[in-house]
Image (cartoon, rainbow, N blue to C red):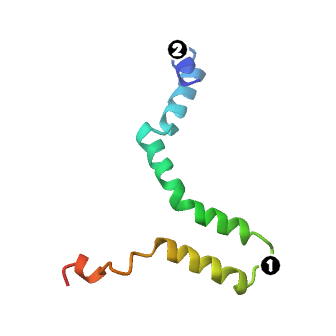
């Protein structure tokens, strides 16, 4: 589509091409999005599970604990060592 607009000479097509070109994602941005999918998937699943109109703490707490566990650094990881303290 972008190539078709670029080949046209009327002002509307040129304007549309510039607009579309400015919002198009680069290949690096697409790769970043692919890399983020596994990170964001638990949040999407939690959102789906908690999407009801009335969500209780008994529903939220286990889900949030699982998300925290998934992204917590390993137990052997020393945060202070990383910062040179």
**Observer-nearest of 82 and 24:** 82
Quarter holding residue 61: bottom right
Q: Do the residues labelled 2 and 1 touch (CB within 8 Å)?
A: no
Residue at the spot 54% in from the left edge and 25% down from the top edge: 2
Residue 7 tag number: 2
Dot 2 alpha-carbon crowd within 10 angstroms: few under 14, some 14 to 19, many 20 or more: few
Residue at the spot 53% in from the left edge and 26% down from the top edge: 17
**Observer-nearest of 3 and 13:** 3
* Above or below, comparing residue 39 to residue 57 in the picture: above
**Observer-nearest of 84 and 12:** 84
Residue 29 tag number: none
Q: Which type of secondary structure does the marked residue at label 1 adopt?
A: loop
User: Which comes sooner in the sequence, label 2 or label 1?
Assistant: 2
Can you say which quadrant of the picture contains the C terminus?
A: bottom left
Can you say which quadrant of the picture contains the N terminus?
A: top right
Dot 1 alpha-carbon crowd within 10 angstroms: few under 14, some 14 to 19, many 20 or more: few
Residue 54 tag number: 1
Q: Where is residue 65 in the image (x, y as percent from the top left)?
A: 57, 80
Q: Where is residue 59 in the image (x, y as percent from the top left)?
A: 72, 81
Q: Position of residue 36 (x, y in %)?
A: 49, 55
Residue at the spot 55% in from the left edge and 73% down from the top edge: 67
Q: Between label 2 and label 1, give the one nearer the viewer.
A: 1
Residue at the spot 59% in from the left edge and 65% down from the top edge: 42
Instruction: Give how far apart the Cα atoms at labels 2 and 1 are.
Output: 53 Å
């Amino acid at each position: 589509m972008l190539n078709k607009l670029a080949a046209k000479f009327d002002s509307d097509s040129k304007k549309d091409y510039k607009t579309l070109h400015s919002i198009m994602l680069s290949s690096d941005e697409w790769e970043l999005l692919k890399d983020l999918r596994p990170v964001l998937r638990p949040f999407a699943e939690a959102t789906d599970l908690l999407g009801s109109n009335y969500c209780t703490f008994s529903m939220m707490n286990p889900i949030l604990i699982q998300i925290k566990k998934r992204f917590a650094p390993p137990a052997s990881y020393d945060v202070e060592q990383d910062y040179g303290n």
